[in-house]
Image (cartoon, rainbow, N blue to C red):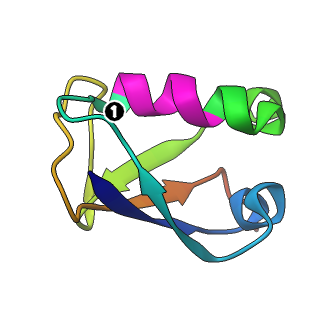
Amino acid sequence: MKCRIKAFGVAREIIGQRETVIDLTDGQTIEDFKVSIFSQYPRFRELKSLFIAVNQEYAEDNILLKENDEIALIPPVAGG
């Protein structure tokens, strides 16, 4: 199944682009997706946190992904 990834901040730098489409196996959860993306892009392991949203809503690790989902990678943001 195909899902679209949108990357923000340092996540965009890690992936090398703002948006990409990936192929996932049916039945994958956010937790499965994290294992895959951390394996493909080891720099994600260096982040203190990484929020993931699916279809514009923050997602827990047990959320099941579906065809055409939009997955946003939201790293910590500094500011003041």
Can residue 12 be seen here? yes
Image coordinates of residue 21 in percent, x first then y, are 47, 66
- Could one spot residue 78 in this view of the protein? no
Tell me where the magenta segment starts and ends, as one range. 31-37
Name the quadrant containing residue 26: top left
For label 1, count other residues whose C-alpha is less than 10 Å away and answer few (under 14), some (14-19) or many (20+).
some
Pick the residue in front: 58 or 42: 42
**Left or right of residue 46: residue 24:** left
Could you tell me which residue is drawn at 27 percent across and 42 percent down?
59
Closer-to-camera residue (67/62): 67
Predominant secondary structure in magenta? helix
The residue beneath circle 1 is 30
Q: Position of residue 43 (x, y in %)?
A: 83, 37
Residue pictured at 78% horizontal, 60% vertical: 10
Residue 55 x, y percent position in the rendering:
23, 65
Secondary structure under tag 1 reads: helix
The picture places residue 45, in percent across and down from the top left corner, at 75, 27
- State the count of labels: 1
